[in-house]
Image (cartoon, rainbow, N blue to C red):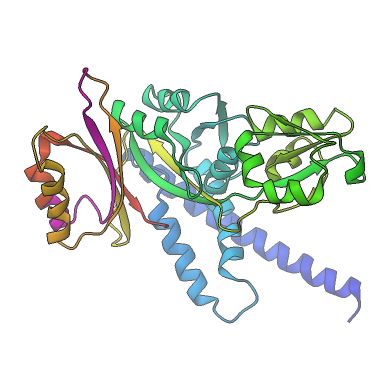
């Protein structure tokens, strides 16, 4: 069989796929009509995961792996959501940032995105209803928690819809043909720290200026027009500004991941049995109050996965409130037993599909 015959087979399969996708879209439109009639949320991460789980199990032993199936179907889901009801999504910018990449990984390339300059502006865009969803970082497994995000969860009436776990891979992008031509490297200070080994091994740091700026995306934009320069940036930023990638995955550690949150004003996920719940807890100022509260989780064998303290800032005392993650859903009987005892001291932030 020659190349032309193989290409003809691919064309025939593409024709069949297009016909099937159109049939799927017609059904999606009917689903959208039902959801609009009942004011139901379009984005259902637990339903999307169930589809990917089912298809991955069905496909075991064949050429496509789970990652490939997920990549294909997340884009199909995103297109479907836009046909059901176009959603506007804000994210911590600039365009080409890792938060932008996290947003596109869940909402696809077709969604209506708004890049905003701060985490607070993303929260406020959701709080005022200018967008349906917002995407913000909450923690990095090397750098720790993003305090501004949990402070705003405490301050505003916003719910967590889902989490996105994104591997952070840095690229070395430049229009120079050789490393010897590079005289300046632009990036965010945190990216320089995370790529220190690469910089020491591949560049003469005594001959090359490392210039910290506010974002890796801006680094790529500068390098797109400035000779003898390079950027440490995300793959999406290099692609966005047309800067060739000389080296990929230059970060020191292979397990550099950031957790992002998808937030919304009014959203409740169904109980899947594989959920995570987040709370804000502001306990009375008396001896043992925190220990007693946490003990209730231990007694019910509920796994606490994170606890962070933050200053109340409400008075001159050094009081704290707590951000807590645990395994389980708000509707679980054991969770309800705890929350009903502490109604005035607990704020529920959301129950959502657990990925970590």
What residue do we see at 61% from left, 79% from top? 62
Q: Is residue 58 above or below residue 228?
A: below
Quarter of the image that includes the C terminus = bottom left
Magenta residues (range): 316-336
Residue 65 rendering spot, x and y as whole percentages: 60, 71
Q: Is residue 188 or residue 44 the one in the foreground?
A: 188
In the rendered view, does 79 fall on the left or right side of 240? left
Q: Is residue 139 or residue 260 the one in the foreground?
A: 139
Confirm whether the magenta stretch covers residue 333. yes
Residue 247 rendering spot, x and y as whole percentages: 78, 51
In the rendered view, does 53 fall on the left or right side of 266? right
What residue do we see at 23% from left, 19% from top? 314
Check the image and name the residue furthest to the top.
316
Number of dots carrying numbers: 0
Occupied quadrant, residue 208: top right
Residue 124 rendering spot, x and y as whole percentages: 41, 23
In the rendered view, does 96 fall on the left or right side of 105? right
Q: Is residue 118 or residue 314 the one in the foreground?
A: 314
Residue 328 rendering spot, x and y as whole percentages: 25, 56
Q: Is residue 133 above or below residue 121?
A: below
What residue do we see at 79% from left, 72% from top? 9
Occupied quadrant, residue 184: top right
In the rendered view, does 284 fall on the left or right side of 23? left
Q: Is residue 80 or residue 93 the one in the foreground?
A: 93
What residue do we see at 55% from left, 61% from top? 70
Quarter of the image that includes the N terminus = bottom right
Q: Is residue 166 above or below residue 103?
A: below
Confirm whether the magenta stretch covers residue 77. no
């Amino acid at each position: 069989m020659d190349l032309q015959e193989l290409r003809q087979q691919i064309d025939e399969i593409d024709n069949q796929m297009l016909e099937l996708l159109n049939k799927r879209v017609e059904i999606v439109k009917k689903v959208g009509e039902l959801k609009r009639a009942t004011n139901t949320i379009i984005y259902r991460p637990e339903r999307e995961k169930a589809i990917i789980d089912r298809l991955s199990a069905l496909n075991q032993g064949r050429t496509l792996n789970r990652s490939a199936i997920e990549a294909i179907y997340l884009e199909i889901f995103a297109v479907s959501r836009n046909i059901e009801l176009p959603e506007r999504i804000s994210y911590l910018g600039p365009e080409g940032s890792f938060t932008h990449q996290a947003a596109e990984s869940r909402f696809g390339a077709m969604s209506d995105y708004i890049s905003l300059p701060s985490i607070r502006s993303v929260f406020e865009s959701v709080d005022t209803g200018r967008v349906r969803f917002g995407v913000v970082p909450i923690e990095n497994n090397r750098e720790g928690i993003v305090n501004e995000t949990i402070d705003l969860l405490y301050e505003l009436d916003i719910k967590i819809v889902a989490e996105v776990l994104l591997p952070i891979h840095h690229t070395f992008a430049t229009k120079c043909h050789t490393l010897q031509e590079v005289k300046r490297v632009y990036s965010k200070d945190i990216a320089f720290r995370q790529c220190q080994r690469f910089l020491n091994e591949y560049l003469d740091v005594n001959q090359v200026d490392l210039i910290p700026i506010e974002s890796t995306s801006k680094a790529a934009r500068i390098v797109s027009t400035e000779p003898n320069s390079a950027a440490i940036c995300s793959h999406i930023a290099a692609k966005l500004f047309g800067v060739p990638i000389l080296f990929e995955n230059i970060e020191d550690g292979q397990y550099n991941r950031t957790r992002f949150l998808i937030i919304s004003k009014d959203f409740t996920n169904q109980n899947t049995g594989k959920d995570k719940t987040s709370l804000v807890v502001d306990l009375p100022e008396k001896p043992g109050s925190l220990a007693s509260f946490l003990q209730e989780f231990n007694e019910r064998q509920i796994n606490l996965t994170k606890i962070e303290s933050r200053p109340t800032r409400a008075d001159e005392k050094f009081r704290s409130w707590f951000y807590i993650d645990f395994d389980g859903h708000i509707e679980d009987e054991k969770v309800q037993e705890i929350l009903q005892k502490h109604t005035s001291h607990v704020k529920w932030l959301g129950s959502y599909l657990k990925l970590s």
